[in-house]
Image: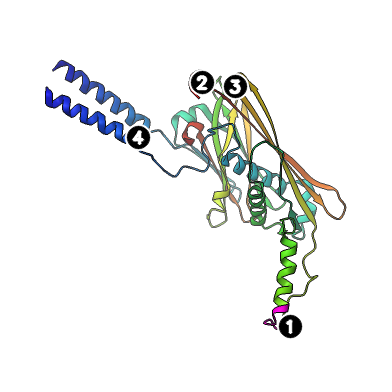
């Protein structure tokens, strides 16, 4: 009977572990930049990521009639941090422009270092930029 | 006790069966690197980076400030040891540049396009079905302003169980009139893998 109890506990533990790994956090940090109003909004959904990588600066300009956004990300860790980021663009009505063509790019930030990522609008209609940062482990 | 053992055996068997089943699922396009080979996400990132670089290049400014220059893109050359569909990469670059609305494109570099255009015009005119006054005449196509070329090269180093793979995409935009290089950029990708001591 004792063996059965041990078996049941082991099975419950295994199920718990499987359940936990299946519930990996897929949220990240989102930075919204609106040059029209000059407002920027930082939304952090992943506590672990927000502790490791922080948004240190946001800048934007216009080149060849296209909006360009620069976001500086800094690591708070002493070791290397790997994240993915993607910058999507939206028109004046808030509609996303060709979201499929904007991919997640791999970014390696060395310990205590800062890196500036840049995104250019797909077309002159692109006004608002949205940067999404996620941990590399979230990309499967 | 016997019934418990039977139940456990049945459960183990069911788990084993489930483990042997083939699973197919859709995965994100931008998944993490799985091999040192060139993967779809590498191509997507490279195309996006190259297009962004071209769109904001200072040399391009004078061409796009008051008009939409006409571009052609030559199929990118593959100088790596891998079989890679370079026409597909070329198409992606063209598609993203077209979507920006800053350029117009002709498609003369693609194999056989010039011949196809001429053959179509001749065929239309010779069939006798088309109104002669509305028929398309040869010699009216838009002239080219600039053209894009590109290459993919590779360096591979193998040291024991470690493989270090380096890829470089290079692209050049040339002004057809002056022959000047208006823009050039490159994107590098480096991947490393280590084979386990046991296994493949």
According to the picture, the residue beneath numbered tag 1 turns out to be: B132
Of the numbered discs 1 and 4, the one sitting upstream in the chain is 4
Asked if A7 appears above or below B7 in the picture, the reply is above
The chain to which mark 3 is attached is B
The chain to which mark 2 is attached is B
> In terms of secondary structure, where does tag 4 sit?
helix
Q: Could you tell me if the residues under marks 2 and 4 are in contact, i.e. CB atoms within 8 Å?
A: no
According to the picture, the residue beneath numbered tag 4 turns out to be: B20
Of the numbered discs 1 and 3, the one sitting upstream in the chain is 1
Residue A135's x, y, as percent? 50, 32
Q: Spatial distance from mark 2 to mark 4, Cα to Cα?
A: 24 Å
Q: Do labels 1 and 4 share a chain?
A: yes
Q: Could you tell me if the residues under marks 1 and 4 are in contact, i.e. CB atoms within 8 Å?
A: no
Q: Magenta residues, as a range?
A: B126-134
> In terms of secondary structure, where does tag 2 sit?
loop
> In terms of secondary structure, where does tag 1 sit?
loop
Disc 3 versus disc 4: nearer the observer: 4
Residue A47's x, y, as percent? 44, 30
According to the picture, the residue beneath numbered tag 2 turns out to be: B196
| Side of A117 where B146 appears, left or right | right
Q: Spatial distance from mark 1 to mark 2, Cα to Cα?
A: 72 Å
Disc 2 versus disc 4: nearer the observer: 4
Asked if A54 appears above or below B152 in the picture, the reply is above
Q: Spatial distance from mark 3 to mark 4, Cα to Cα?
A: 31 Å
Q: Spatial distance from mark 2 to mark 3, Cα to Cα?
A: 9 Å
Of the numbered discs 1 and 2, the one sitting upstream in the chain is 1
Tell me the number on the disc at residue B162. 3
């Amino acid at each position: 009977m004792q063996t059965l109890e041990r078996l049941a506990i082991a099975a419950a533990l295994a199920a718990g572990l499987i359940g936990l790994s299946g519930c990996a956090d897929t949220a990240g940090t989102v930075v919204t930049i609106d040059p029209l109003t000059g407002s920027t909004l930082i939304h952090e959904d992943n506590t672990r990521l927000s502790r490791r990588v922080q948004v240190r600066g946001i800048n934007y300009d216009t080149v060849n009639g296209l909006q360009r956004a620069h976001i500086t990300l800094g690591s708070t860790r002493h070791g290397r941090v790997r994240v993915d980021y993607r910058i999507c663009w939206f028109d004046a009505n808030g509609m996303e422009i060709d979201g499929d063509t904007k991919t997640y790019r791999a970014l390696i930030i060395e310990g205590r270092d800062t890196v500036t990522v840049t995104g250019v609008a797909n077309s002159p209609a692109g006004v608002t930029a949205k940067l999404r940062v996620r941990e590399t482990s979230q990309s499967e | 006790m016997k019934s418990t053992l039977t139940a456990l055996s049945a459960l183990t068997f069911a788990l084993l069966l489930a483990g042997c089943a083939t699973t197919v699922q859709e995965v994100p396009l931008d998944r993490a690197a799985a091999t040192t080979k060139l993967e779809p996400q590498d191509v997507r990132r490279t195309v996006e980076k190259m297009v962004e670089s071209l769109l904001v290049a200072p040399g391009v400014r004078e061409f796009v400030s008051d008009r939409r220059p006409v571009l052609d893109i030559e199929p990118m050359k593959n100088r790596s040891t891998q079989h890679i569909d370079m026409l597909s990469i070329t198409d992606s670059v063209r598609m993203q540049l077209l979507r920006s609305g800053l350029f117009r494109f002709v498609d003369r570099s693609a194999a056989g396009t010039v011949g196809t255009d001429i053959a179509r015009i001749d065929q239309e005119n010779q069939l006798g079905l088309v109104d002669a006054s509305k028929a398309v005449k040869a010699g009216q196509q838009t002239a080219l302003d600039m053209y894009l070329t590109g290459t993919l090269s590779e360096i591979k180093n193998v040291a024991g169980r470690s493989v270090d793979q380096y890829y470089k995409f290079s692209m050049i935009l040339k002004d057809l009139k002056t022959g000047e290089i208006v823009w050039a950029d490159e994107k590098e990708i480096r991947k490393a893998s280590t084979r386990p001591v046991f296994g493949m």
